[in-house]
Amino acid sequence: MKNLSRLSLFIVLLLTLPAWANGQTAISEQKRKLILELIVVTKTEEEFLKSADTTMANMELSYPATIKSALEGMTELSAREREEMERSMIERYLSISKKVRSRLPQLIDMKQVINEVYIPLYDKYYTESEIKDLITFYGTPTGKKVIEKGVLFFAETVKLIEEKINPKVRKIVEDIAKELDGAGPPAPEKKNN
């Protein structure tokens, strides 16, 4: 099964890379310099690593609820077995996550990320004029605040989505799982207006 997944991924990459490569045009030296200036102004390297760390920290917070919810449906296990499995899975996940978070900055080559991700995307989605406008904006007090608060804004957004949206998504997944297990579709919920 694992080899089949790898083969499928290889085939998809094989089929899509030529189209992607053909669609790329050379970036002018002027535009490349502007993009690099924008990357410096927006503190992309620093913010990238902060964002990755914040995302993983949020996942550490939400993982226990996800595991608990998944294990609740395992009725073939006793309550004690589910609790032990939950504890073990959470401990293992948190241990791995903390190690990944500590090693990630040393493993990511930001120059490579900038050259292979940011530069091509800025080139694809923004003209030279728009990049100049972005540099100007991020040089303003409001632009600097967007950069400064961006990771915090992102982290809080993820946390609130986890709190407000994910329970609804989990409910949908549980309902679908019950349908697939033959319990039949649940009665539609009444909306309180």
Image: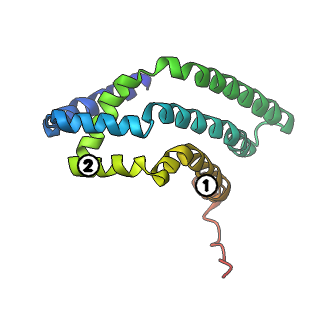
Residue 143 horizontal/vertical position (percent): 45, 51
Res. 5 image quadrant: top left
Separation of disc 2 and disc 1 at Cα?
29 Å
Q: Earlier in the sequence, mark 2 or mark 1?
A: 2
* Kind of residue at badge 1: Ile
Label 2 environment density (alpha carbons within 10 Å; few <14, some 14–19, many ≥20): some
The C terminus sits in image quarter: bottom right
Q: In the rendered view, tell whether residue 170 sits above or below residue 112.
A: below
Residue 180 horizontal/vertical position (percent): 57, 53
Image mark for residue 83: none
Tell which residue pokes out farthest to the bottom in this image. 193
Label 1 environment density (alpha carbons within 10 Å; few <14, some 14–19, many ≥20): few
1 left or right, relative to 155: left
Q: Nearer the viewer, residue 83 or 49?
A: 49
Image mark for residue 126: 2
**Which residue does the image show at 53% across and 37% down from the upper left?**
51
The structure's colour scheme is: rainbow
Residue at mark 1: 161
* Kind of residue at badge 2: Tyr
Residue 173 horizontal/vertical position (percent): 60, 53
Residue 1 horizontal/vertical position (percent): 43, 26
**Which residue does the image show at 30% across and 29% down from the upper left?**
116
190 left or right, relative to 130: right
Q: Nearer the viewer, residue 84 or 168?
A: 168
Q: Nearer the viewer, residue 145 or 167?
A: 145
Q: Secondary structure at mark 1?
A: helix
Q: Is residue 180 visible?
A: yes
Q: Secondary structure at mark 2?
A: loop
57 left or right, relative to 4: right
